Each structure stands twice: as C-alpha cells, then as structure tokens.
Amino acid sequence: MSATSLQAPSYLFLPATRLDRLDKALSSGAGAVILDLEDAVAAAHRPAARDALANAGARLAGAPPGRLWLRINAMDTPDVQADLDLLKALPWVGVVCPKAQHIDELRALPAGRDVLALIESARGLVLAPRLGEVPSVVGVAFGSIDYALDLGGIDPEDHEALRHARSTLVWAARMANLPAPVDGVTTRLDDVAALQADARESRRLGFGAKLCIHPDQVAMVNAVFAPTEAELTWARRVVELAGDGAATRLDGVMIDRPVLQRALRLLASAR
C-alpha cells in the first residue's frame, strides 16, 4: 500500500459484518474503503467478522492497491490482539488506528503497514504534531463524534464549536509532514445540504478528504473537494501570467510565488 491513497477525497466505512456490500462500496466512487471492526460491529459479532475477513482474503486481495483499510479496535481494548492477529492474513490492507493518543501504541502496530491515525480526544490532538515520529503513520483523520464527547458532550454538528480542533489538526498534520487530514463523518444520512455544508467547512479549513458512512454520501464529498471550474480557470490564468515566478497582478490582485504555488496545486489536484 502507498500513501498516495491519501490523496482520495472520500473514505467510506463498511461494517466488517457486511462483506456482501464490498463490491458496492468499491464501485461507489470512494477513494478508499475502511472495513470497520470497531464502532460498526457489536463486540459479540467481532469473532465471526474476523473469521469472515480471513476467509475472504483472496477476494480482498483483488481490490486495487491502496483501496482497502481495516479499522481495528483501540490499542488499549481487549479486542485489539485478535485484530492484530487478523492482520497477518490481510497483508495488503492499511490500518486505521482509533483513539490514537500514545506514540508507543502506534509504534507497536505491525511493521510494514500504512497507518491512518484517528484523533478522537483532546489528548490525541496534543499528540498529533508528533505523528511524524512514527514512520508507518501516513495520515491522520478526525473522529469528530468521539472528540466532541471527550470535550464534555459538545454538539458534534456545531462547526464553530469544533473549528479550533479542526484547524489545529490541519496545522498538526503539516507539522508532522503528513498530507492534509481526513475530516470526520456527517451522521445525517438523508440531509444532502448538511453533508455539503460539512464538506465545504472541511475543505475551507484545509482538510484534504472526508469520512463517509454511506455510499450515497460519496459523490457529494468528491464534488466538494474537487476544484471548481472557476478555480481552475483562475489557476490557469495565474500560471499563464506568473509562470516565470515574477510578481505580477491579476484582476487588481498581486500575484507572487505563494499564489502561483496555490494555482499549481489546484491544477495538479484536478489531474
């Protein structure tokens, strides 16, 4: 697996008990599918889910490289050892590590695996700038629902209440030399406007992707994170005018090197 999978704008959760929906998930347009052994599966059903995943090894191996991840249980839970044992039968999947808040726990994950650290607490947010110390960590995601609970039960749908945490995580990812982080889920399954507003807030704050909990959410998330035609037109004009790196002006606005770099990034993301 490669960290290039983190360039995908959407990550779709799939309960590990619903492998019958795997083909649908992989064809949903999501950049990656996260097989979930944690919150989506009751503790009593996890042994059967692990057996099903192990038995489906050959089928899972047929997924495109970098498309499949496994969310294990938190490293301080009784379930995690069985999850880690399962990974031996699934050598090609990345690991989503929930409740990430200790460097030593991340270092204890199996070597040679890409790890997406899921920040779900204030302690985890403090840890985030140090994630670059763990070579296997290739990205970071925001578990907004659990984070809101950790802070005393604030409303996880309140953009203003979580804006500090989101902005801090974007900054922390940069400090750790990681890609732009993946934002948390939108729980309102039938509210397209809420999903669009959440995704726009994520992109505006500097996130590079968003977690999804239903295939119907994927298209909207992909659309919001894609550059608009107006943005691409602006970027092409900037490159045409300032491609040699010299400062100039466009529509009354100064164009210098940082603006040129932003334009080049927009064009690269469209490709």
Image: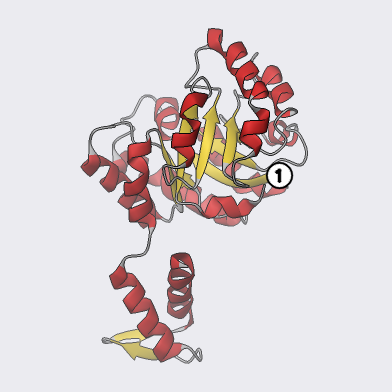
Figure check: 60 above or below 32: above
In the image, taking residue 186 as reference, residue 182 lies left or right, namely right
- Residue furthest toward the right? 111
The quadrant in which residue 223 appears is: bottom left
Which residue corresponds to the image point at 70% horizontal and 28% vertical from the top-left? 87
Q: Is residue 75 visible?
A: no
Horizontal and vertical percent position of residue 254: 35, 85
Front in this rendered view, residue 85 or 59 = 59
User: Residue 65: image x %, image y %?
Assistant: 63, 47
Q: Which residue carries the number 1 mark?
A: 136
Left or right of 175 in this view: 155: left
Q: Residues within 10 Å of mark 1 (few under 14, many from 20)?
A: many
Residue 83 is situated, as x and y percent measured from the top left of the image, at 67, 22
- 251 relative to 271, above or below: below
Closest to the observer, 262 or 14: 14
Depth check, front residue: 45 or 108: 45
Look at 48% across and 30% down and name the residue there.
14
241 over 217 or under it: above or below: below
Percent x, y of residue 121: 50, 31
Image point (62%, 32%), residue name: 59
Measuring 62% from the left and 23% from the top, which residue is drawn there?
A: 53
Amino acid type of the residue that numbered disc 1 sits on in the rendered structure: Ser
What scheme was used to colour the molecule? secondary structure
Dot 1 lies on which element? loop
Tell me if I can see residue 263 in this picture: yes
Residue 14 lies left or right of residue 157; in this view the side is right
